Image: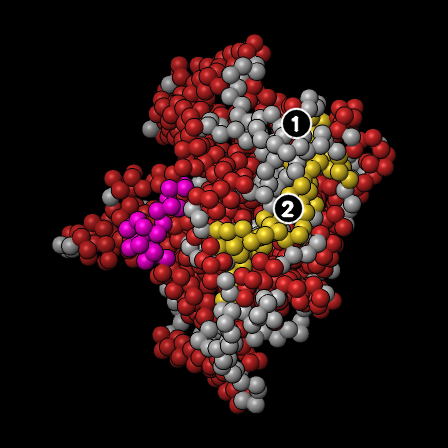
């Protein structure tokens, strides 16, 4: 119903465009297919695995000269070394508090009892009872899993990375919120920080900041800081005008306007930024372990060397639990920040004091007595968990691998191989022209210009062919992600019960380190591009599903009821009302799904995806391939920017079409 | 409302008194004693890089155990990939790498050019790189171990990834591979597919043996997995000195690597007991495989595994100790 009016009216406002665009797109595609059959195999720009271009050699040389100037250059002596010293000191300090023996003691300053008491107290004080219980339970679980010290090391590193991220991220975010110019300037930098694969900058980081906590923390905060900046800026920007104008009318200075109006009104959004920063920091735990970052990541990586899925899973669960606890606590804190507290202030003060004293006593006990300092080793939950995980994976490998193998073969032969053939076997200039033409047709001229620059960069990187292989996999994975997003998202949006059951699974999918499930996936789908696609889907689908579910839920109940009253069955309600009305969420879900899929390209390289992902991994592992790895990393970023800008332009256009109905 | 508040206050009171009682009773427990600073003889701190494979870890664990128990060193282990560990020599953050596979490029860069590293001799372990098939295949197709017959069997190895040719599975990106050139120069009807990590490669071979599926892949010895599944090596044209000089024209097997130890220049110049231990350290493939098996298959920690081996091999350890 809604769709028909939409097309009618937009056909009325822009008749030529509406009729011609799909035809033009189809025309481009047909032309492409015909040209492909005639020209396939020409100018494919295949670069053999071990071959380097001049650009790659040059990048190697740059990297070497940085290393050589380490001990002489003033930038190192007075800038990088100072940063390193401060970071190292910070991390070592927090580790000494909760994780590592320090100050001449065989144990950290605070033992398990103190940490659990303080974490619960803080959760209660800033949020509520329920999350305080959750926090206490979660932290106790780390001890029962036999991973207390590892978890505290991870927590220490995460805390420092988050702290530093916020220290710089929030002011930068405020600046980006106030100044359009700065916002435009910083956006591409943030894109780069979030999509450049970590493997690319791990080795240079250790060159600049040496091996140690400083490098691990900086690697983490490069990835974790952008959400803090972006979301703070978004919060400042979306403060409604009237209260700000009111402050202005009282003659407030700029500073007062910020502290009295803008900041208080965007408090909740800023806390959300803190939340996302924490999640991003935890996502780096395993990767940072590759440069000796202490904590749970090391356990995962070590277990992988002996293909011990159970032990890796056990540590993975601890990471997931830490993420869920921190997520729920910060989310509850942001709700509290907005809604305030209903308790009588006097009672609350008493409770604060009472429980504070209790936490202090626990802390003192854990400082003084061994039983409260070292987690008792009696319960061996961790062993049960790893045995269980091993049993489940073994069963799945033995019983499901025929079925999963058939799925892999089907998708690969039916979808992936043809698409890849089309993308890779077209001459690069034909492929480039098709991309630019499609960008112009489904997006706009600006998107076409961006696409043209991106095509040029991909060719210049010397990795055109590998980029097209990666693009084919990315497109297939994104398609699967969007399909899952729609199906599961609508289901969750329509049923609260489904939501309650599925949401924790989605959280686990997002926070379980990919290294944990690589081996079982290889067992199920063998070493193949599909395995990489599947890993990408596991990581990216939760985001898409959550966004769609929220979109469906946001549709006013009355609209849905009206449709039901008018005699629509469930299917009609979904396809005619709920999906069209949640269209903006669908666009956002596609966009985010795509970015998340791209961030798994490197992980895919570890299980048979080849192409850009493998180049990045190889560049991290072998010195002489470093330059090529860096170029591959840049190619991934370029692919991301190209797809993102085209998708955004297309979304803007389709948003404008329904807007025409209202005017 | 009022009663809820009262209840909360009471709850707080109760828990407070519980803790107070707990604190009193707990006072009998063992107290945290401050530990004395380690009395680290003349050895001091000794930093070993731990590269990410089990064989390496076996070497490192045994050396660390001896350094700690016999020489009184404070051993620091850092988990690092090869390239990053070599970088650490120059900054004084790494003293020793105790199993190095070739890496002529790194030797040139850090030993010859930057002069921050020096060679500390062989570990006595021989490294073999090559193409392997699972044992069931060698049994069923005995002539498959000769490369001349590989084309005959190419169709067996076809997968969705190999584009109609046989699949040659390449693995860990840390190792140098000539496989694309080999396939081309030996005119083999195969395509190289990159598994991209050691666990993926191991899992592929493990499953191939269990389900009797064909796999041909790049692997190496010593590796703990070979004691779980005894992969069989395919013989490529024999290695001759210099036959791999031009990476584009390679048409011969990989050389046998003498796995060696690399230490930082300053560590070697100081010539302390830890350096002498590293320099003297040498054992055999069997020794390493045994310790690696303790770690990978018997689920021992590297420290336990090293202790067990050292106690059973006192005579070998004796020979590594500095002669004073």
Q: Chain of mark 1?
A: B
Compared to residue A107, the image places residue A72 above or below, namely above
Alpha carbon of mark 2 to alpha carbon of mark 1: how far? 21 Å
Which range is magenta? A63-84
Quadrant where the C terminus of chain A is found in the figure:
top left
In this rendering, the answer to whether B236 lies above or below A190 is above
Q: Residue furthest left?
A: A251
Residue B283 vertical position relative to residue A568 in the rendered view, above or below: below
Location of residue B81 in the rendering, given as x and y in whole percent from the top left corner: 54, 49
| Total marks placed | 2
Q: Nearer the viewer, residue A231 or A485?
A: A231
The residue that disc 2 covers is: B258
Q: Secondary structure at mark 1?
A: loop
Horizontal and vertical percent for residue A458? 44, 27
Q: Residue at x 44, y 76 (%)?
A: A103
Q: Which mark is residue A101?
A: none
Compare residues A630 and A227 and report the one nearer the observer: A630
The residue lying at 54 percent from left, 61 percent from top is: B275
Magenta-drawn stretch, dominant element (helix, strand or loop): helix
Residue A34 on image: x %, y %? 55, 10
Would you name the residue on which mark 1 appears?
B251
Answer yes or no: are tags 2 and 1 on the same subunit: yes
On screen, residue A412 versus residue A102, left or right, reads right
Please report the residue visible at 55 percent of the width from the left and 31 percent of the height from the top. Answer: A50
Tell me the chain of label 2: B
In-front residue for pair A89/A522: A89
Residue A196: x and y, percent?
44, 40
Q: Is residue B235 magenta?
A: no
Question: Do the residues under discs 2 and 1 have CB atoms within 8 angstroms?
Answer: no
Q: Residues within 10 Å of mark 2 (few under 14, many from 20)?
A: some
């Amino acid at each position: 119903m809604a769709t028909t009016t939409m097309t009618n009216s937009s056909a009325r406002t822009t008749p030529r465009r509406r009729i011609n665009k799909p035809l033009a797109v189809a025309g481009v595609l047909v032309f492409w297919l015909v040209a492909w059959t005639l020209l396939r195999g020409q100018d494919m720009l295949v670069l053999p695995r071990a071959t380097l271009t001049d650009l790659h050699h040059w990048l190697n040389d740059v990297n070497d000269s940085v290393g050589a100037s380490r001990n002489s250059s003033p930038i190192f002596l007075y800038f990088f070394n100072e940063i390193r010293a401060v970071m190292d000191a910070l991390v070592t300090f927090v580790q000494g508090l909760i994780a590592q023996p320090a100050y001449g003691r065989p144990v950290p300053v605070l033992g398990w009892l103190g940490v659990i008491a303080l974490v619960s107290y803080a959760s209660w004080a800033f949020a509520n009872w329920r999350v305080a219980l959750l926090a206490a339970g979660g932290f106790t679980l780390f001890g029962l899993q036999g991973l207390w010290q590892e978890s505290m090391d991870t927590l220490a590193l995460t805390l420092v990375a988050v702290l530093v991220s916020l220290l710089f991220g929030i002011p930068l975010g405020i600046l980006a919120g106030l100044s359009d110019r700065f916002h435009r300037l910083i956006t591409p930098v943030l894109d780069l920080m979030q999509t450049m694969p970590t493997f690319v900058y791990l080795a240079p980081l250790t060159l600049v900041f040496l091996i140690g906590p400083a490098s691990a923390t900086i690697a983490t905060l490069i990835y974790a800081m952008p959400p803090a900046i972006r979301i703070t800026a978004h919060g400042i920007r979306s403060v409604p005008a009237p209260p700000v104008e009111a402050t202005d009318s009282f003659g407030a200075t700029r500073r007062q306007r910020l502290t009295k109006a803008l900041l208080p009104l965007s408090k909740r959004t800023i806390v959300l930024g803190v939340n996302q920063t924490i999640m991003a920091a935890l996502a780096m735990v395993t990767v940072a372990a590759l440069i000796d970052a202490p904590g749970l990541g090391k356990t995962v990586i070590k277990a992988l060397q002996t293909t011990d899925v159970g032990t890796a899973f056990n540590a993975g669960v601890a990471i997931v639990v830490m993420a869920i606890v921190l997520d729920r606590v910060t989310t509850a804190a942001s709700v509290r920040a907005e809604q305030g507290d209903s308790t009588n202030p006097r009672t609350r003060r008493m409770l604060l004091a009472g429980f504070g004293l209790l936490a202090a006593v626990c802390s003192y006990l854990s400082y003084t007595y061994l039983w409260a300092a070292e987690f008792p080793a009696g319960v061996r939950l961790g062993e049960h968990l790893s045995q269980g995980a091993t049993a489940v994976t073994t069963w799945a490998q033995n019983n499901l691998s025929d079925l999963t193998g058939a799925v892999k073969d089907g998708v690969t032969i039916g979808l992936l191989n043809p698409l890849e053939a089309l993308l890779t076997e077209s001459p690069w200039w034909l492929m480039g022209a098709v991309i630019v033409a499609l960008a112009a047709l489904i997006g706009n001229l600006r998107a076409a210009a961006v696409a043209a620059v991106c095509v040029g960069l991909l060719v210049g990187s010397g990795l055109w062919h590998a980029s097209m292989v990666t693009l084919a996999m990315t497109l297939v994975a994104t398609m699967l992600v969007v399909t899952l997003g729609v199906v599961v998202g609508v289901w969750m949006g329509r049923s609260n019960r489904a939501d309650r059951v599925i949401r924790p699974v989605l959280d686990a999918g997002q926070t379980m380190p990919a290294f944990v499930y690589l081996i079982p996936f290889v067992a199920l789908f063998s070493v193949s591009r599909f395995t990489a696609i599947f890993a990408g889907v596991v990581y990216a689908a939760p985001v898409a599903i959550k966004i769609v579910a929220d979109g469906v839920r946001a549709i006013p109940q009355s609209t849905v009821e009206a449709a039901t009253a008018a005699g629509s069955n469930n299917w009609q309600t979904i396809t005619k009302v709920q999906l069209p009305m949640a269209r903006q969420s669908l666009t956002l879900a596609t966009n985010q799904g795509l970015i998340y899929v791209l961030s798994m390209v490197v992980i895919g390289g570890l299980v048979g995806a080849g192409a850009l992902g493998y180049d990045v991994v190889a560049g991290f592992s072998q010195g002489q391939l470093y330059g090529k790895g860096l170029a591959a990393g840049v190619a991934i970023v370029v692919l991301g920017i190209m797809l993102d800008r085209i998708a955004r332009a297309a979304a803007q256009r389709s948003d404008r079409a329904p807007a025409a109905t209202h005017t | 409302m009022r009663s809820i508040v009262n209840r909360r206050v009471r709850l707080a009171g109760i828990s407070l008194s519980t803790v107070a009682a707990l604190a009193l009773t707990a006072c009998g427990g063992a107290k945290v004693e401050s530990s004395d600073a380690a009395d680290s003889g003349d050895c001091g701190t000794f930093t070993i890089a731990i590269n990410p494979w089990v064989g390496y870890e076996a070497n490192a664990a045994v050396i660390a155990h001896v350094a700690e128990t016999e020489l009184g060193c404070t051993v620091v282990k850092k988990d690092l990939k090869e390239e990053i560990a070599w970088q650490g020599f120059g900054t004084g953050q790494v003293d020793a790498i105790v199993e190095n596979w070739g890496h002529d490029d790194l030797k040139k860069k850090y030993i010859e050019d930057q002069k921050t590293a020096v060679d500390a001799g062989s570990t006595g372990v021989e490294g073999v790189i090559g193409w392997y098939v699972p044992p069931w295949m060698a049994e069923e197709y005995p002539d498959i171990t000769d490369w001349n017959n590989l084309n005959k069997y190419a169709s067996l190895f076809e997968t969705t990834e190999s584009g109609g040719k046989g699949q040659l599975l390449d693995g860990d990106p840390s190792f140098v591979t000539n496989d694309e050139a080999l396939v081309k120069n030996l005119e083999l009807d195969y395509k190289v597919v990159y598994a991209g990590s050691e666990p993926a490669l191991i899992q592929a071979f493990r499953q191939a043996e269990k389900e009797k599926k064909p796999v041909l892949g790049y692997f190496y010895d010593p590796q703990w997995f070979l004691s779980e599944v005894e992969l069989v090596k395919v013989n490529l044209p024999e290695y001759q000195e210099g036959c791999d000089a031009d990476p584009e024209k390679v048409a011969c097997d990989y050389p046998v690597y003498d796995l060696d130890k690399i230490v930082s220049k300053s560590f070697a110049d100081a010539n302390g007991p830890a350096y002498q231990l590293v320099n003297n350290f040498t054992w055999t493939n069997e020794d390493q495989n045994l310790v690696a098996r303790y770690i990978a298959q018997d689920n021992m920690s590297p420290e336990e595994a090293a202790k067990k081996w050292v106690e059973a091999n006192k005579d070998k350890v004796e020979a590594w100790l500095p002669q004073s």
